Image: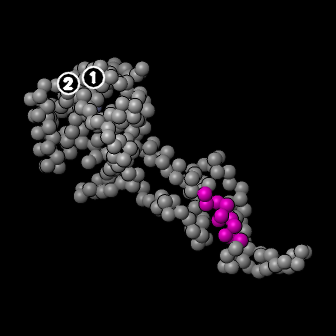
């Protein structure tokens, strides 16, 4: 069961009456939302976010965009419960307006309709129902109404953590070994009691391999993993390509979705 409540419906969601024919008033939005379970035979808590490319691209206005891959939803059916719930003529008029607004690049007006609440949007979010193989487009304003759909920043954060933890797990032990093997890292060799030559590392490499040896892959905070890889770069040690990209990535100014 969904635990959405409608009495907290925010006035800010109401669409300006001069900006299109989508659901203008919160009252219309609530009506649409209340029909959702009946129209789709699903509950909001059964939907999850569709996969998207984690590296954003910029459009011609310098706005950051994320693209949905579509790889996780092959063979899924796109459903439009809002459009199905209004008469054909209104639907056609709305779509025509969206095409017009998009063509003008006017971001103060709607470019699409949230299929959950019927509200107009510019930034879109795609969600999927895996059991029924459904896909649906909603406005980013409605993401929080689907309890299992994380917003973009949370998805990116979880994804980043996964990348870093996988990387440190694979990379740590072979790197410690390689630190001891590279001639550049060795200050001198000494004759051990067993008669073999043993290396003495330069201090910075000795300290770094000690640090790496102590890491607990599952427990170490994400921030510290990043720090470990940054130090590795400073010491000219090879780090995984995806991590390199991640730790040198510029801060994001805008994490909204759009087409
Ligand atoms: Zn919505």
Quadrant housing residue 2: top left
- Disc assigned to residue 137: none
Residue 256 appears in the rendering: no
Quadrant housing residue 229: bottom right
Q: Looking at the image, do the residues carrying marks 1 and 2 touch, with CB atoms under 8 Å apart?
A: yes
Residue at the image point whose x is 60% and y is 49% from the top: 221
State whether residue 223 is above or below residue 8: below
Left/right placement of residue 228 relative to residue 72 reads: right
Residue at the image point whose x is 20% and y is 45% from the top: 107
Is label 2 in a helix, a strand or a loop? loop
- List x then y, in percent, for residue 240: 53, 63
Q: How far is the residue under mark 1 from the one under mark 2? A: 8 Å
- Disc assigned to residue 39: 1
- List x then y, in percent, for residue 241: 50, 63
Q: Which residue is mark 2?
A: 85
Quadrant housing residue 212: bottom right
- List x then y, in percent, for residue 231: 60, 65
Q: Nearer the viewer, residue 131 or 119?
A: 131
Q: Nearer the viewer, residue 158 or 153?
A: 158
Badge 1 or badge 2: first in the primary sequence: 1
Q: For the N terminus, give its image quadrant.
A: top left
């Amino acid at each position: 069961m969904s635990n959405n409540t409608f009495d907290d419906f925010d006035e800010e969601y109401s669409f300006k009456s001069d900006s299109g024919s989508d659901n203008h008033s919160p009252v219309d939005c609530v009506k649409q939302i209340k029909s959702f379970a009946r129209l789709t035979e699903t509950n909001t808590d059964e939907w999850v976010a569709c996969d998207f490319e984690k590296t954003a691209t910029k459009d011609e206005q310098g706005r950051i965009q994320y693209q949905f891959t579509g790889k996780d939803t092959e063979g899924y059916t796109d459903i439009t419960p809002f459009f199905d719930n209004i008469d054909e003529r209104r639907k056609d008029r709305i779509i025509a307006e969206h095409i017009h607004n998009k063509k003008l690049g006017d971001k103060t007006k709607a470019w699409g309709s949230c299929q959950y609440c019927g509200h107009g949007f510019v930034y879109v979010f795609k969600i999927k129902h895996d059991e029924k193989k459904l896909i649906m487009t909603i406005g980013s304003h409605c993401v929080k109404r689907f309890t299992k759909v994380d917003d973009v920043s949370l998805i990116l954060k979880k994804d980043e953590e996964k990348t870093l933890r996988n990387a440190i797990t694979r990379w740590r032990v072979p790197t410690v070994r390689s630190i001891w093997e590279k001639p550049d890292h060795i200050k001198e060799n000494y004759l051990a009691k067993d008669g073999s030559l043993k290396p003495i590392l330069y201090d910075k490499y000795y300290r770094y391999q000690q640090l790496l040896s102590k890491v607990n892959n599952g427990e170490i905070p994400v921030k510290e993993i990043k720090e470990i890889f940054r130090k590795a770069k400073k010491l000219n040690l090879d780090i995984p390509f995806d991590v390199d990209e991640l730790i040198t990535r510029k801060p994001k100014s805008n994490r909204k979705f759009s087409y």
